Structures are given as structure tokens and as C-alpha cells.
Amino acid sequence: MSRMQEQRFELKYLIEEERAQRIRPYVQQYLRVDSFGMHQPDLSYPVHSLYLDAGSLETYWTTINGNANRFKLRLRYYDDRPNTPCFFEIKRRMNHIILKERGGVKKSAVPALLAGEFAGPEHLLARDSVPDLMAVRNFQTLMLRLRARPLLHVAYRREAYEAEGDNSARITFDRQVLCAPNGESSLRVESADTVGPFPSIVILELKFTDRFPHWFRHLVERFDCVLCGAAKYAGGIELGGEKWATGLPMPEWIDRLAEEGVTGVG
């Protein structure tokens, strides 16, 4: 289900697999495995993101420079089947608060929406969802203002735990992070020329919507976790090099819309 402007805090830690295995039973005392990983042998499921950025790598540099207020544009999907969802996501950071705005669309609509076609109910998974429609249009507005286009495919496996009945607390373990250039609107799940920004490392994320749960604090202290940054998109660009951005062809629609004087939609 899509959510409009979900506000939360996110804390990231890089840990080795042995420590992740010790943390898992501790987490299971408080949270349940989410529905996507519940029936998987490793309790994990694949996550794919197609990140968009300007030719100048504007959103990449806001991350590297540690800008307090920044955002990323990405398409989130989970497989390459044509009838499963794709979500247009704006992930904003405002100081220490994360705001995520997302709208679910049909995969068949992705090429047209990335080419600047005005989002309408016919593109959505839920035709009557006003929040989804506004989220996709807001995504397009930022995309066009930034002249952003598809740039990087990021894939990993996620083991996730969540609170029963609400989203007040969530913990994820992300493994096998791989990044590869993708300058097209294709939602691929496999790529050549991949790099792994976090080899043999597990990214532990503690997410909460209100107060820092007391047992989160105990977890961090008990397992000696050190707070750090772990931006998958930025890590992929750092390893792949800026040539991934400058080496990809510029989509025709960027120049066309620039000539028409289009700087945003909605």
C-alpha cells in the first residue's frame, strides 16, 4: 500500500555477518518478520531501485557534501514480472528526519512517465488514489526541474522486521548490495558491470516514527554498533565513477522538454 509523506527517523550501522546473526534473535523478541520474507528460507527478499539524477550528479553531491536538506528520486520494484508494482519514490532528508513520498504505478506506464507524460489515473495501480497521483506528479516535477534521468540500478536482499499492527518501529538487514549503470527506463533485475560498495558487510537500519525505543538503545550498546552513513546510491557512484553519469546517452525527452520550456508538471 502506498503512503503519503511517511515521516520517520533512520539510523544506519555497518556490521559483519557474524554480528548480524547474533542480533537477529534479539530483534525477534520485539518485532516480527515482515510478510515478504516470512516464507523465504533466508527470511529475505530482493529489492531493486532505479535511481535518477542530473548529468551533474546533483543528488549524489548533496549526499557526499552532507547537506542537511536533500532528496533522492528512485523507482522501487521487487522483480521483473510485468504485472507487479513499481513505486515512484521521493526520499527526502530534513536534518535527521526522513520523509518518503511514494506512488504505485503499472510497470507498463514507466517509460511514458519517465519521458514526461503527465501522470493520470490510468497510469496508477489504484486509479482512485489521490495520494498516489500527487506523489507521482511531485516526482515528475522534481525530475523535470533537475533534468534527471535514469542512472543507476541498485539491488540487494533485505531481511526486515516490523512492529505488530503499526509502523512505529522497523529493523532491516540489507545484504549483497550490487550497483550497475542503467540509463534506460527498463526495470532490470540483473546487470553486467556491477560493483559492490559494501562487500561482505551487512547494513543494519533502525527505523522509528516517534521516540527512540529503549530496546533500540540496548541493542546498539549490547552489540557495540557504531552509527555511520551507508548510502547505497552514493556508494555505487563512488565505485563506478562519475563516468557512469557522463558516459550514458542523454534521453531525447530532456532536450525536447528544455526546448519547450517545460520545467515542471502539476
Image (spheres, helix red, strand yellow):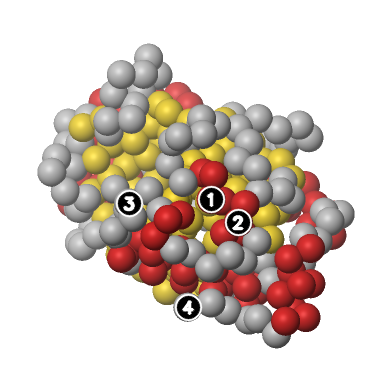
**Label 4 close to label 2 by CB (< 8 Å):** no
Above or below — where is 39 with respect to 249? Answer: above
Q: Residues within 10 Å of mark 3 (few under 14, many from 20)?
A: some
Element class at badge 1: helix
Residue, disc 4: 266
Report, in whole angstroms, how far the alpha carbon at label 2 lies from the one at label 1: 6 Å
Element under disc 3: loop
Cβ atoms at labels 4 and 3 below 8 Å apart? no
Judging by the rendered image, the residue that carries numbered circle 3 is 126
Q: Residue at x 74, y 50 (%)?
A: 183
Q: Earlier in the sequence, mark 4 or mark 3?
A: 3
Q: Say which residue appears at 69% left-offset and 71% top-offset.
A: 147
Q: Is residue 217 left or right of residue 106?
A: left
Residue at mark 2 to residue at mark 3: CA–CA distance = 18 Å
In the image, which disc is placed on residue 109? 1
Residue type (three-letter) at the residue carrying disc 4: Gly
